[in-house]
Image (cartoon, rainbow, N blue to C red):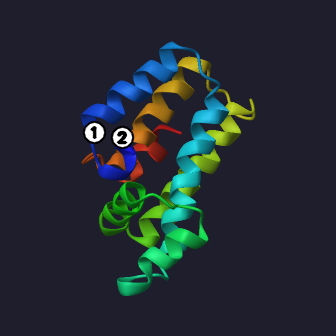
Amino acid sequence: SALLQGNIELTDRMLTQLLLDKTKLNLILWSITKILRDIMALDEFKGPNFKQGCRQLGILSFDAQNDYQLACRRLSYSQCQQLLTIAFQLELSIKGLTTDNVTQISRKLYDFGHKIAGSRLPLDFCSSKL
């Protein structure tokens, strides 16, 4: 929910802890991209239909629906598309299809999470590191 709420400080703590705990990078990436895909799917449910769209995606709690609504206001459909392109590049790195080492991939994933949470990093910040 920290990513959805745009809480950069909490996102920072969560991502740092996940990386320190050596959580599999592909699991972190999958979780983040799931959020992005849901935001994109909710794009067609603006206004009074938003809660219906949330229910269709299995987002049932009132708090989660409000968090998604905040994220939908902060991230446009085209920004989500750009972020998913970055996610694909990260996935290639995680699968070993680039020359990046684990430290580089972890840093990129950390930056990627920050961008989704609303960090002022330009969208090309993460991709320029890939």
Name the residue furthest bottom: 48
Q: Residue at x 35, y 66 (%)?
A: 69
Q: Secondary structure at mark 2?
A: helix
Q: Residue at x 29, y 49 (%)?
A: 6
Q: Quadrant of residue 92?
A: top right
Q: Quick one: quadrant of the N terminus?
A: top left
Q: Which residue is mark 2?
A: 114
Task: Classify 20 as above or below 15.
Answer: above
Number of the label disc, if any, that sits on residue 8: 1
Q: Residue at x 38, y 52 (%)?
A: 4
Residue 129 point in image, percent of width and height? 47, 37
Residue 4 vs residue 87, the one in the foreground: 4
Q: Residue at x 31, y 62 (%)?
A: 70
Q: Tell me the kind of residue under disc 1.
A: Ile
Residue 7 vs residue 65, the one in the foreground: 65
Verify CB contact (< 8 Å) between mark 1 and mark 2: yes
Q: Counting other residues with Cα less than 10 Å from the Cα at mark 1, is it few (<14), some (14-19), or many (20 or more)?
A: some
Q: Secondary structure at mark 1?
A: helix
